[in-house]
Amino acid sequence: VLAYAGSALPLLLLFSVANRSLGDVLTSESVAIEVARSAVGGIALALSVPLTTGIAALLATPQHNRH
């Protein structure tokens, strides 16, 4: 979370220097892109944990030989 906030800080400073209203900032394309990036990153992180756990469980189970 802190890494994302740190990377978004220059964008927030840019809006602050540009003297734009809060409504203009919230409806701008660059803010929409940042929101989409964070949503996709959060979904990917949430899906990666069960996916890697499932793969590890499949690989860790002993193989039964059929002779």
Image: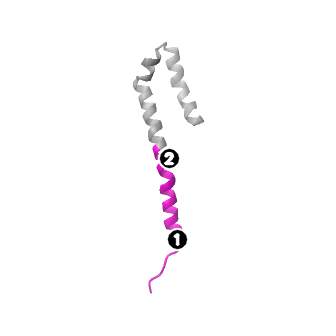
Between 50 and 9, the one lying in front of the other is: 50
Q: Is residue 25 above or below residue 38?
A: above
Q: Mark 2 points at which residue?
A: 45
Count of marks overlaid on the render: 2
Callout 2: helix, strand or loop? helix
Quadrant occupied by the N terminus: top right
Q: Which of 9 and 39 is in front in this view?
A: 39
* Amino acid tagged 2: Leu
* Residue at horizontal 51 percent and vertical 53 percent from the top: 49
Bin the neighbour count of mark 1 within 10 Å (Cα to Cα): few under 14, some 14-19, many 20 and up: few
Quadrant of the rendered image containing residue 30: top left
In this rendering, the answer to whether 50 lies above or below 5 is below
Q: Which amino acid type corresponds to the residue marked 1 in the rendered image?
A: Thr
Q: Residue furthest top?
A: 19
Provide the residue designation for mark 1: 61
Which residue ends up furthest to the right in the rendered image?
Answer: 2
Examine the structure image and report whether residue 53 is included in the region drawn in magenta: yes
Considering only vertical position in the picture, is 23 above or below 48? above
> Residue 13: where, in percent of width, then height?
54, 20
Q: Where is residue 14 in the image (x, y as percent from the top left)?
A: 51, 19
Give percent across and percent down for residue 25.
Answer: 45, 20
Magenta-highlighted residues = 43-67
Tell me which label, 2 or 1, sits earlier in the chain.
Answer: 2
**Residue at the spot 46% in from the left edge and 46% down from the top edge:** 44
